[in-house]
Image (cartoon, rainbow, N blue to C red):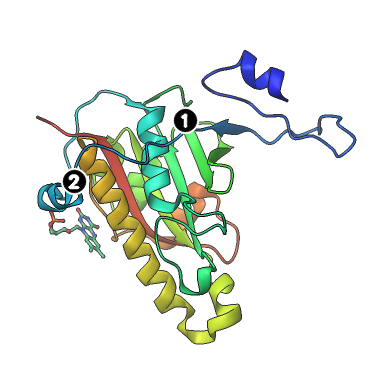
Amino acid sequence: MKSIALLLPPMVIALAMHPAGAPRAQPAQSVELPTPDRTGTMSVERALNQRRSVRAYQGEAMTLDDVSQLLWAAQGITHANGYRTAPSAGALYPIELHVVAGRVEGLAPGVYRYRPGDHLLVATERRDRRADLARAALGQPWVQAGAIAMVITAVYERTARKYGGRAPRYAHIEAGHVAQNIYLQATARNLGTVIVGAFDDADVKAVLNLPDGEEPLAIMPVGRRQR
Ligand SMILES: Cc1cc2nc3c(=O)[nH]c(=O)nc-3n(C[C@H](O)[C@H](O)[C@H](O)COP(=O)(O)O)c2cc1C
């Protein structure tokens, strides 16, 4: 596994192995992400002061470092016990993150699911779905204009097992934390984003091929801010 990883930087196609070591017939395709910066240069006060919903982006590609940083800010693991950058009721983590990638250096266009525990992306589709996502978002053009669109989803059942009917409320609160983290991280990297809540649920689920029990809550296109 290590030798394959070394041969294919920066995108690593990791072959999932049987316990015995033989590759599976349908290998899972994963992309290792660069180590996130945990210090940064912009103060939280400055990021808060500059945060704005941005709907116009430069055409240039984002870097894999940008994508790594946004995902880490949203849901990165920051503690040995698995706690993350955003709080979660009972530390049950119902929030999932997807990246609909279009123009990213070192990342093929496609749809990816973030795995916080390994800080990697797992490819779920290998074609650019930004235009389809924009159509699902009632034609809002900025959804397609970002180099990527991040989609925040929730698996309510994870939280409902402990908190019953309060689970949707808790998951929605958590999605707000995650979204603000993305806003602030984007601001600190001179990227722009906007949270988009107006979309057709079934259409977004179809674009992401979401399993039953996972619901889309917000779309956040991200691109380089226009100067
Ligand atoms: C729950 C929620 C849903 C939103 N949905 C959309 C949307 O569908 N499209 C959009 O362009 N902006 C959307 N926004 C962004 C707001 O329009 C924006 O936050 C507001 O105009 C204030 O601007 P600011 O974020 O720059 O402070 C949404 C914001 C929130 C909190």
- Which SS class for mark 2? loop
**Residue at position x 17%, y 34% in the image:** 225
Q: How many marks?
A: 2
Dot 1 amino acid type: Pro
The answer to whether residue 114 shows anywhere in this view is yes
Quarter location, residue 82: bottom right
Q: Which residue is mark 2?
A: 43
Quarter location, residue 105: top left
Q: Which residue is mark 1?
A: 34
Quadrant location, the C terminus:
top left
- The image position of residue 35, as x and y in percent, is 46, 33
Q: Earlier in the sequence, mark 2 or mark 1?
A: 1
**Residue at position x 20%, y 42% in the image:** 187
Dot 2 amino acid type: Ser
**Would residue 160 appear left or right of 56 to someone viewing this image?**
right
**Residue at position x 16%, y 38% in the image:** 56
